[in-house]
Image (tube, rainbow, N blue to C red):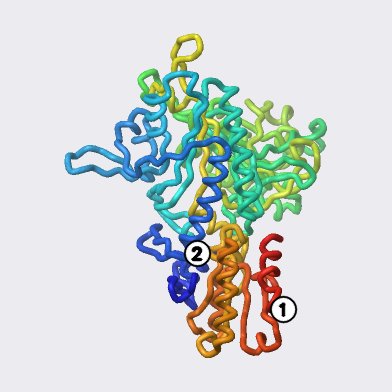
Amino acid sequence: MKASQFFISTLKEAPADAEVVSHRLMMRAGLIKRLGAGIYTYMPMGLRVIRKVEAIVREEMNRAGAVECTMPVVQPAELWEETGRFDKMGPELLRIQDRHGRDFIVQPTSEEVVTDIARQELRSYKQLPKNLYQIQTKFRDERRPRFGLMRGREFIMKDAYSFDRDQAGAQASYQAMAQAYRRIFDRFGLKYRAVAADSGAIGGDLSEEFQVIAATGEDAIVYCPTSDYAANMEKAESAPPAGPRPAASQPRTLTPTPGKATCADVAELLGVPLATTVKSLVLATDELNEAGEPTGVQVWLLLLRGDHDMNEIKVSKVPGLDKGFRFASVAEIEEHFGAKPGYLGPLDLKKPVRIVADREVAVMADWICGANKEDHHITGVNWGRDLPEPDAVADLRNVVAGDPSPDGQGELAIERGIEVGHVFYLGTKYSRAMNATFLNEDGKPAHFEMGCYGIGVTRLPAAAIEQNHDERGIIWPDAIAPFTVVLCPIGMDRSAAVKEAAEKLHDELQAAGVDVLLDDRGERPGAMFADWELIGVPHRVVLSERGLKEGQVEYQHRRAISATQVPVADIFSFVKEQLAA
């Protein structure tokens, strides 16, 4: 490939709306062009990266036994109505009508369509297991699209769906996909972690996210440096506190705390560690009769240590809160506590509430909480002596760095990551909703056991850039770089020797299967080098008339500080060695 025949459109400055590094660099390097909010054109340079990502994904999916198909971007609403997602999914689901007034959706995912295929085509257990996948355009109507391809509305995704006759088969299919994903992400050349993820209302414990490690990542990844434990923040468990609860040693005391409505402010005022304070979070659940009509409200008080944060996923698993909850209104709070938020606590309530204590709070003694009286807190609070034991004790909090690892193998650490893949055991959620069955060995119909497996094809290049860049631009891993090698001849239009040497090396590398580009645009060296450093091609060879007279060319890896002089006669084999390394 010659640069004069390609499409190169770099910018010196990024658009003002480009917020994160990947968005800025993808725009500046001419990989994408914005068409509308969260909608981008993949320019030729960016499309080459996407195609390389797709090729790796496709090879490993095929190797794992999955079979490729393509499902429609526009899908009839009837299928989505069968599962209830047409109404439940909310405004993120783009709904449209055709000229006849029939409802359709623009797919954000394809569980309904693939389940419809299975119930029509997979009639017997003898046809199982099966795994169908596609690499296809998706659309999710994000309310606030941002960060370029990291959170766009239109995107390309690989989604796969497995069908098995029983749970054991489904687990085997899941493990096959989990291993395929590890091979895929290993080939991308990125630092990543596979972390246990919460499976939510779908059920089951088999769910893993694949996170590319990046300081700018939106997700917190919890892991143990001395073991294999890793989970996302939603899933990460805090180890049960060690030892029994200490005995009370302080009297219960009403303490003035004027204007101090947060645990941090109270701890600072009283000169005590923040960990001795307890924060009160008030939730509510609506009680319904058999007809689904509201009959009342149950108010809940969650107690967490002042230096800890509530984990909503964990809270949603507490019995009584597992069918949905909301934060209580100010009116509900005042009705039950007789005070406004900021000074709430479990003592001297106006009306009873259900109290759930985090495991850490359940073993605390002499703690500090709100007094249900403005500008006052109570110090020296103890379970049993000052208030009854809580109605329930549960793990309610986000873990923090330094917590003991749940596997007992060390302490937890936290780093940031960008989710680019997810493997998920679905069970029979969709097959039951759509009555998708097959005839089992006993001749009776059974519902398919399903799994789903996604990779964000267009999100992945952005994640790779967040992990691999410097002040000059992108640094692509070889496997997904738009070009692997760029040849930069200086004065090619003025020197026959430079032109001949550059074209000879280009043709040799191309014949050897190397993805090489020859920059024959006649740009000044500074501008030419700046373009390729911005675009991030990992291997660069510079040819000049002076160097050729000395029998030398320059090789430089994108990460290297300085160039290496290589004899002209050895440059082909030298580059091949660098690519193999």
Residue 522 percent across, percent down from the top left: 50, 84
Residue 526 percent across, percent down from the top left: 57, 84
Q: Residue 204 falls in which quadrant of the image?
A: top right
Q: How many marks?
A: 2
- Residue occupied by mark 1: 567
Residue at figure coordinates x 64%, y 27% from the top left = 392
Name the amino acid type tagged 1.
Pro
Name the amino acid type tagged 2.
His
Residue at figure coordinates x 40%, y 41% from the top left = 70
In the rendered view, tell whether residue 220 sits above or below residue 405: below
Query: Local crowd at mark 1 within 10 Å, few (<14), some, or many (≥20)?
Result: some
- Residue occupied by mark 2: 23
Q: Secondary structure at mark 1?
A: strand
Q: Secondary structure at mark 2?
A: helix
Q: Nearer the viewer, residue 30 or 58?
A: 58
Say the numbered circle drawn on residue 361: none
Query: Local crowd at mark 2 within 10 Å, few (<14), some, or many (≥20)?
Result: many
